Image (cartoon, grey):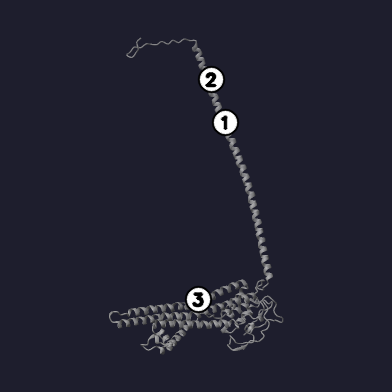
Amino acid sequence: MQLKAEPDMAGKVVRCPGCNSKLSIPATLGDLPPPSGLPSPSGFTPPAETSSGSEEFSGTEQPNPAELEQHRQERGGWEETDPTNPNPLLSFGIGFVLFLAWVGILYPFQAPEGTSPADYTGMQFIASLFYKHMLVSFTNTLFFTWAMAILYLKFKKLRHQREALLLDVLPWELGSEINAQNVSTFIDNLYKLPVRLRDSMMVNRIRKALELFEVKQNVGDVTNMLSSQSDIDSMRIGGSFTLLKAFLWAIPILGFIGTVLGLSHAIGGMNFANVEDVTAIMKSINAVTSGLGTAFDATLLGLVLAMLLNFPMNSMMKSEDDCLNDIDAFCNEILLPRLNDGGSIAGGDTNGVMETLVRAVALAQKEFLVDLNALSARINEQAANLDKRATAHQERVDAEFAIAVNRMREDMTGAIKDSVKTTTDYTRALATGIQGLNNVLTELGGKQILIHQVKKKGWFSKHD
């Protein structure tokens, strides 16, 4: 098994994360591996065969699709355990044992009855905090020990994740870059890691990324998958603290409840029936004040336990977040730059990336200009057709108007002619009538007509 070591660890003795045995890191770690995209060291020859006997697809050889698919099915993966959530039954069992041990330790230190709280020793005072409010205090203690057991199990899981970070999961001896030809070799190397360490967030994430790259052969898909997996791990770590946060909330609340119960009992024990008996009154007041002190002890215990739980819980949250950030940094800075799907981005060629982007932008601009010219031509054509249609419509309107005017003029001329003819005929008839009247008057001019007035008699006639 190959391990990674920082230069400042040279010459030190450490424990192997795989077998837990001591080993000495060489004083000279050798030259650092070349960055991604650079030629491999001189004399490098990729191994032709793995320890399992499966043939490696290296160089320019193209793998047989049928054999490659069969090889994928034979791997089968491995069962993944929860990397951050401990077994609730196991944590409760450990917490319950710690609770019984603590209660048993404090039992002999209970103060004898009748001892004044001012005379308590240190252990007697601590024992009184737990035994005066047994229900509330024991519940708070059980919650506290259960929470500490959860933190202990989470610490063991975190140490396991940290040990897995020491593994050399992407050996440079297998290739300076990961492509379609040698990705199977890197996956097989992961399957050869110790079973105890390969079931970790980092190894699982890298295995999923390489297996996806083996199928898709696209760096973009692998990048999206790694980002999604990082979000999943982050939410899983955040959700693992739900029960601890509930304990951190419940412990001081139960302390306040114990205080309220103690106050109610103390006030309920006040007896001032005989106000003349000073001794009885003093005893009642002493009982009340003693009860008040006992009541506030429950709140004191809850606040102390909550404070003792808060610091390790927040420390564990930060440690798990740092571990997750280290895994994200490894995937982004080590794994992704070594992936090569045939493009220039995976090889780290910045000039090639810029040239590709410039060509893509130029091609897009050219297509845009072509489409813009075609659209302008169509707009000009539509404008010309619109002018032609407007001219033709105007000509048609003028023609229809001229025809209508001519028709109206002809109708008016015909009507005037008919009116003139009618008037002429009427005038001619009138002239004939006048002529006939003149003739009659002429004939009458030569004759004398006598008109005699006849006088009538009557009642109303006038008499000269």
Q: Residue flagged by tag 3: what amino acid is it?
A: Gly
361 displayed left or right of 299:
right
For the residue marked with disc 1, what is the amino acid?
Gly
What's the residue at 60%, 73% (across, down)?
223
Label at residue 43: none
Q: Nearer the viewer, mark 3 or mark 2?
A: 3
Assess whether mark 1 and mark 3 are in contact (beta carbons under 8 angstroms).
Answer: no
Residue 74, horizontal then vertical, whole percent: 59, 80
Is 425 in front, or is 223? 223
The quadrant in which residue 125 appears is bottom left
Check the image and name the residue furthest to the right.
42
- Mark 3: give few (<14), some (14-19) or many (20+) Cα within 10 Å: few
The residue beneath circle 2 is 431
- Badge 1 crowding class, 10 Å Cα cut-off, few under 14, some 14 to 19, many 20 or more, is few
Give the class, few, some or many, for how many residues have Cα within 10 Å of label 2's Cα (few <14, many ≥20): few
Q: Say what secondary structure mark 1 lies in.
A: helix
- Name the mark nearer the viewer: 3 or 1: 3
Who's the residue at 41% across and 78% down the image? 256
Residue 239 is labelled as 3
Residue 92 picture location, percent across and down:
46, 83
Amino acid at dot 2: Ala
Name the spot of residue 26 as percent of width and height, x first. Answer: 65, 87
Q: Name the residue nearer the viewer: 139 or 428.
A: 139
Query: Which one is earlier in the sequence, the residue at label 3 or at label 2?
Result: 3
Image: 372 above or below 297? above
Between the C-alphas of marks 3 and 1, the distance is 104 Å
Circle 3 SS class: helix
Disc 2 on helix, strand or loop? helix
Q: Earlier in the sequence, mark 3 or mark 1?
A: 3
Tag 2 or tag 1, which sits nearer the N-term? 1
Q: Which residue is mark 1?
A: 414
Q: Nearer the viewer, residue 131 or 462?
A: 131
